[in-house]
Amino acid sequence: MASFTARVIICILALLNFIFVFITGAEFVRFISFRVIYHNITGDSSLCQDSVPWSVALWDSSVLNAVVVDMGLLALFVVQHSLLARAPIKQVCQSVLGVLNRAMYCFTTALTLQILMQYWEPVKEAPCLWSVRNAPWNTWFPLLCFALHFLCWSIICSILLVFDYPELLGVKQVYYECLGLGDPLALKSTRAQRLFAHLRHPVCVELAVVLWLVPALSLDRLLLAGSLSAYLALAHSLDTQDCAYLRVQLQSKLQLFSLPHGDAAQENDTNKQE
């Protein structure tokens, strides 16, 4: 009975974590894309002050305070996201939390993102590094950015689904534990496990696009885009073996469209074993 109660509690915690991470992801999309594009589509120019020269803005106490706060928030996210991914820390968390280890990692990541979004300080007293204000591009370029942002976020969601979204959030681990199936990652092939160990962020290009492709680049946006882009570039370590595995898997997926239904199902099972 105690075992059944413990499993129920674990399932509830994993479900609550899934909801929290999902809500945080939706708010992160609004924070990254909606705020800056909305200001430009509506003609609101309060994101920055182009009339203020940089020589004055960089000595403004409000600008410096905002930069310090934003850099501290970015440092908090990077430290959390990197420290808990270290092998010694993961082993300690695994021994304490067990099957909830991955869910805890996602929860702390979402929590740091919530803190970053809630306490982020826009730098409105400094000029923009670039700003599209001349007609007709002041209307069309924000719309183009909106369309490309929508496309990139759609691709990101698709990639997360391909990379087993429930497993990324720690839900699948709990489900497998309750059914006595063990760790789902252990059921994957050695080459797949190696790929997942090296490719921590499979959406680097798409995130870089939404971070930098904006109608107006303010100082705080430069800090956000520059810091996250550098972190994304340094966080993965793909090599030739990983690229070869991805190429083989892509070719096999494309071949499924040209095979009959029965052969396609058999080929898909073979790819899962690889």
Image (cartoon, rainbow, N blue to C red):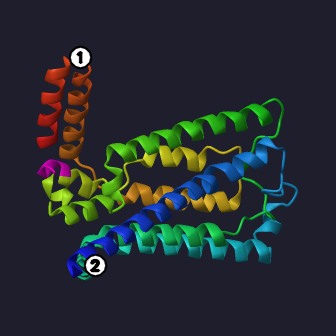
Disc 1 marks a residue whose amino acid type is Ser
Question: For residue 179, which quarter of the picture?
Answer: bottom left
Name the residue nearer the viewer: 272 or 120.
Answer: 272
Residue positioned 53% across, 67% down in the render: 113
Q: What SS does tag 1 mark?
A: loop
241 over 143 or under it: above or below: below
Q: Which mark is residue 220?
A: none
Q: Is residue 59 visible?
A: no
**Mark 2 — residue?**
97
Q: Nearer the viewer, residue 8 or 35?
A: 8
According to the picture, the residue beneath numbered tag 1 turns out to be 258
Residue 234: image x %, image y %?
38, 59
Residue depicted at x 38% and y 69%:
12
- Kindly identify the amino acid type of the residue bearing the numbered disc 2: Leu
Q: Quadrant of the N terminus?
A: bottom left
Q: CA distance from mark 2 to mark 1?
A: 45 Å
Q: Earlier in the sequence, mark 2 or mark 1?
A: 2
* Whether residue 157 can be seen here: yes
Residue 150 image position (x, y, % from top left): 58, 39
Q: Which residues are magenta?
A: 188-192
Residue 115 higher or lower than 229, as above or below? below
In this rendered view, identify the residue nearer to me: 32 or 8: 8
Tell me if residue 191 is in the magenta stretch.
Answer: yes
